[in-house]
Image: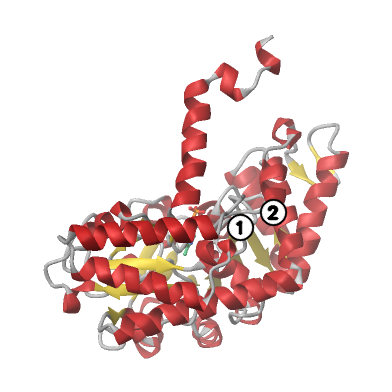
Amino acid sequence: MAFKQSLEQIDPNTAEAIDLERERQESTLGMIASENHVSKAVLEAQGSVLTNKYAEGYPGGRYYGGCQHVDTVEELAIDRAKELFGVDHANVQPHSGTQANMGVYFSVLEPGDKILSLSLSHGGHLSHGHNVNFSGQLYDVEQYEVDPETGYIDYDELESHASEFDPDIIVSGSSAYPREFEYERIGDIADTVDAYHLADIAHVTGLVAADVHESPVEHAEFVTGSTHKTIRAGRGGIIMCEEEYADAIDSAVFPGAQGGPLMHNVAGKTAGFAEAQTAEFEEHAEQVVANAKRLADVFHERGLSLVSDGTDKHLLLIDLRESYPDLTGKEAEALLSDVGIIVNKNTVPGETRSPMVTSGIRIGTPSLTTRGFEEAEMETVADLIVDVLDDPDDEDVDDRVDSRVNELCEEFPIYG
Ligand SMILES: *Cc1c(COP(=O)(O)O)cnc(C)c1O
């Protein structure tokens, strides 16, 4: 009976692709700042029979019968999120970080209302009002930028921009800004112009949970996050807010923006949040940041130029224009990929190339830290990266780096 056969038996092509992907993850150094490896427990929760269950509504108030056990799971996720982040209210149903932002916009904005957010090419995110995304199409968006000299957000410019534009909401948070945001300052600016402050902590959800990155909770009405990045709780999103916005947020997510929740993913969040409450996770998060700082040190020693000169968190952005004027982000990504180091090309402030080419690469430490890498390994990896970028046509260098990458992967297996 087909129903009881394995994936391998029913669909060997897909089974093989999954196996190859597992092998790819084990045998390369994943340094994409938004990615991570989830634990076996999270994989188990996400691959569970909860995928079968419809649970429109919220715990205790569902539109379907048979929800007693998924209620338990969702209540656990909510309680753990409230504890981890010190918030009044958490909604764990958003399918992704983008849907979490959608939930916030739908809760307090009308189409045509004004959003002030960080420009995409300066580190922002599509869901902060880019014109190819619903957020840019439904709302009137203006953007703030980083100071091209320092690479830090220009808060004075942000302040005068806000008083001129008079936004309904100011969005903080980023995908590629290596520094912490001054949440208090942005919250104050939002107050002066009578705007909401949405702090999108997608990238740093795990760092905030572990207290190694400042929490915006005191300074923002809304905090959104991704659950698959630094917090390692499986793919999904989360919204947190003050009690007075709880009902507006819940109805904006369901039925406003989404249908039934992905209960297997909610279970992933429940499991991941349990791990995030341990002392082990706190140490892990500290190591993520220490590893990124060590990478930055070695890059500095070897003469590379970094946006904002370094990092406060889990990622850094190499600006290739000074050290390697002829090398594009796209080419650097391909060169590193050829030796098993996976990064992504990224625009840099003052970008002159297209977003498909770029002049930068973004490098993150969460996945390698999850594998067990510490400062000593990060020094090795940083040197390997610079060796490849310094000599893009030298096959001996490539061979040497490639075999060193393999050794590191074998020494630090992900799932064993
Ligand atoms: C990753 C990210 C998101 C969410 O992206 P999804 O792919 O929709 O989960 C939202 N905001 C920022 C700043 C991000 O970096």
Residue at x 61%, y 46% (from the top left corner) = 256
Secondary structure beneath disc 1?
loop
Picture quarter containing residue 122?
bottom left
Identify residue for label 2. Answer: 269
* Amino acid carrying mark 2 in the image: Lys
**Circles 1 and 2: CB distance less than 8 Å?**
yes
Q: Quadrant of residue 10?
A: top right
Q: Residue furthest bottom?
A: 156
Expressed as whole percent of the image width and height from the top left, the position of residue 401 reads 32, 62
Image point 88% across, 40% down: which residue?
A: 68
- Residue for point 72% across, 50% down: 41
The kind of secondary structure element at disc 2 is: helix
Residue 156 located left or right of residue 83? left
Q: Is residue 315 left or right of residue 317?
A: right
Q: Is residue 276 visible?
A: yes
Q: CA distance from mark 1 to mark 2?
A: 7 Å
**Tag 1: amino acid:** Thr
